Each structure stands twice: as structure tokens, then as C-alpha cells.
Image (cartoon, rainbow, N blue to C red):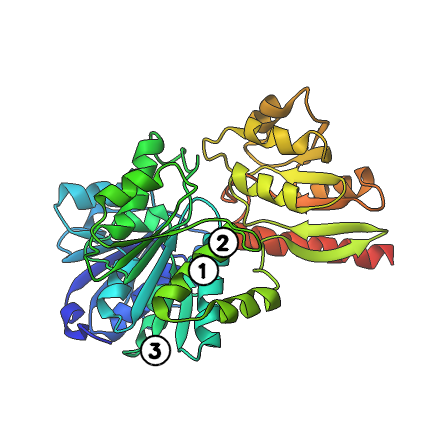
Amino acid sequence: MRNTEYFKNKKITIIGLARSGIECANLLYNLGAKVSVTDAQDNEVTRRNCAKLISEEIKIELGKHSRAFIEGRDLVVVSPGVPPASEAMIFSRELNIAVVSEIEVASMLCPGTIIAVTGSNGKTTVTTLVGKILEAAGKKVFTCGNIGNPFSGEVSKIKEGDFVSLEVSSFQLENIRDFKPKISLILNFSRNHLDRYKDMQEYLEAKKRIYLNQDKNDYLILNSDCPVSQALAQEARGNIVYFSKTEGLNPNQAAVVAVGVILGVTKETCLKVFKQFNGVEHRMEYVAEISGIKFINDSKATTVDSAVWALESIAGQVVLIAGGKDKGLDYKVVLDSARNKVREVILIGEAKEKIKAALKGALLISEAGSLDGAIGLAFNKAKPGDSVLLSPMCSSFDMFSDYEARGRAFKKAVLELKAKKE
């Protein structure tokens, strides 16, 4: 790692005790920082996460954010799930203490080449595929960020000459300072996260920060089919490279090929990787077939556009399980794809009334009080040859800790149902 002395003896508070908070706290402690962690939740999950901290010298505050845990700190590191309106964030601003994201901390230490991927849809798939084409080309690569391991959990293993394929969200980009990827990708831009941002422009401003510090030695890859790309190209200082859906390549694959061209990975290598790629967990993941009905886990689909893509990718009729925590999206967008494809929608979670209002009259709708209940109901509604698709169009935070926990719960319940039916 580089810049390791920077954090020595610094007093640092981390806001949020999920995966990135745990990894960042342990990393900074190992670098000699005086680390504190604060989380507004005090429950089984946060108490279990406390046990993952490597030292009792790391101070912990659960169930609240107090001013004392922020005051006198040299730096505050905020986890992506923590909103700007959090008390801890308010204290940080009032006390004029610098706030950075976990990816900022890791990037300061990282000696490798960073390829950062953002966009409203497709980030996980593209980040995974970028890692796979680099591996196929004989490169040492770490695939991390929102996908799998946090960046700060991997950075101590990264050496000069290695590559990092990094999935980054708008939440993480809000609090970067010097974060400077060699290659940045903005895959697309559509309505999302309006529970956090006041409008689409504010959401776009967060996404644009991915190229904030890039210069003429860096690259920004943009989707030529995305309406905002031309405006972004005018602002950016890096070299602009465009990708577009073409015959034989979907947009995600085209974006990956664009990265390959910059880094000297042949198109033939990319195509071989695409052919062997079975997809990512929780994104159009086949789980099981029960009585001729396929069950598909698409828990990663936290936007309406993602659900549309899923529906259009499935042959035959679908019973759709949707709902969760609303992100301020327009659920009517799904109707064009759903009208002739969806046999019935089973709604769960906080957003079910809003989704029902948007889809009422166009689709048959039922409700369930739990994901397990929705799976049983969907099985009863479906016919042989149909697919039961979990594609929620919402975040998971009303019922689950994250989309992965929701996806695992879906798979567990489906496999239990299969065992009962066999």
C-alpha cells in the first residue's frame, strides 16, 4: 500500500457498521489510527458486526449518534447507506470535520490501476465482466466495491501493476475528495434513488463525481445511446471513449469491450469470457424448477428499468414478485413490458400500495405479508411453463439488510418449497 503513514495516530470516526464500515475500521486500526464506530441501529445484525472488529480498542456506539463520537476527530468516514440528514453527518458539518467515503480511504492507499463503474443499471454485471476479461488476459485483478468485498477489505493485498474493477454507487461518490480512477464508466442514467435526491439533476451530479479528478491521462467511457452522455463529454477532462449496443453485443458487453481496448485485452478474449459467463448472483439467477414452474432470483433489480430488462429477457408468462422500500420511482414504466407478459403481480413491503396504485387496472394484483408468503402465493398462481420472478423494483431495507439478504431468503424459501413438493 501507499500513503500508509497518513492515517497513523489520526482520530477517525466511521459512521455505519455494515460491511464497508467494518472493513474500513479494521484497515485504519491496522494503520495506527484511533478508530471509533457509530451506528444508529442497535440490533442483532449490528451487535454481530461488532464482533468482526479486530480490536477492543475500537470504540463502538450503537443505537444512536452522539456529538461526542464526532467532536475532536481528524476525519469522518461515512458508509454508503448513511444519508446526509443523519445526525452524525449533521454533527460533522457543524464541527467542520472532513467527511469522506470508504472508497476514498481505500483509493488513497491503492497502488493499483482503478477501473470504476457506475450507472443506474448494470454496474454489477459490468464490474464482474471487467474483472474476468483482465483475469483471462493474465492480469492480477481485484473485483470489489458494492459487489462482494468492500474496497478497503482488499486494498492491503493490492500491489503496483495490479488492477481493481470497482463498482461504485452515487452514494459512495457523494463524499469522494481525491478519488481518481484511471478508467471511469458511466453505463447509463435513469430515474433512481429519488428517496435520497431531491430531483434527477441532483442524482446526476452525484454520478458525475466519478470523473471529478480525472485528467488527460485518464479515460471516461460513456454510452452513446444515453441522452446525457454528450453533455458529460463536454465537461470531462479525460479521454472520452464511447460504447453502444451492437449486433452480437448487449450494452453491458459493449462497455466491457471498450475497457478491453484501452487496456490491451483483445475482443476475442472478451467474447470468450462472455460465452462462459453464467451471470452474477441475485441478477436473473435461476434457482429451481418446481412442477414445471421456474423460479428466478433477480433481487438486484432495485429499479423499474432493471425489472423491465428482466421481463423482456424471459420467454413465456411470468408471476412477478415486487415491492420493498420505495425509492421515488415511477412504477408505471413497467407496464409496456408487463401487460402481455405478467400473469399476476404479488406485492410485498412498504411500497406495495404505491405500486398497486400505479399498476391497478392493467395487471392482476395480489399482496403478501412476507417474502415466503409471496413465493407460496406465486406458486399457486403460476402454471407449468411460467416463471416466478423476484424483481422487486425497490430497495430491500424495509425487510432485509440488503438485496443480497433478500435474494438469499428467496432462494432458501424456494428450495424449501421444492423439497416439500418432491
Q: Are marks 2 and 3 in contact (CB under 8 Å)?
A: no
Residue lying furthest top? 361
Q: Residues within 10 Å of mark 1 (few under 14, many from 20)?
A: many
Marker disc for residue 55:
none
Q: Where's the N terminus, which quadrant?
A: bottom left
Query: Which residue carries the number 2 mark?
Result: 252
Q: Is residue 31 left or right of residue 258?
A: left
Instruction: Label 3: state its secondary structure.
Output: helix
| In front of the other: 62 or 405 | 405
Q: Residue 21, can we see it?
A: no
Query: Which residue carries the number 1 mark?
Result: 256
User: Which residue is found at the position 47% from the left and 58% from the top?
Assistant: 126
Please tell me which of labels 2 and 3 falls first in the chain.
3
Q: Is residue 365 left or right of residue 151?
A: right
Q: Give, as a three-letter code, the residue at label 1.
A: Val
Question: Vertical placement of 9 versus 179: above or below?
Answer: below
Measured as percent of width and height from the top left, residue 18 is found at 41, 57
Q: Residues within 10 Å of mark 2 (few under 14, many from 20)?
A: many
Question: Vertical placement of 41 versus 412: above or below?
Answer: above
Please tell me which of labels 3 and 1 falls first in the chain.
3
Q: Is residue 44 left or right of residue 166?
A: right
User: Which residue is found at the position 20% from the left and 43% from the top?
Assistant: 91
Q: Is residue 124 left or right of residue 37?
A: right
Q: Are marks 2 and 1 in contact (CB under 8 Å)?
A: yes
Q: Give, as a three-letter code, the residue at label 2.
A: Asn
Q: Give, as a three-letter code, the residue at label 3.
A: Lys
| In front of the other: 383 or 231 | 231
Disc 2/disc 1 C-alpha distance (Å): 6 Å
| In front of the other: 384 or 87 | 384
Query: Which residue carries the number 3 mark?
Result: 157
2 or 3: mark nearer the eye: 2
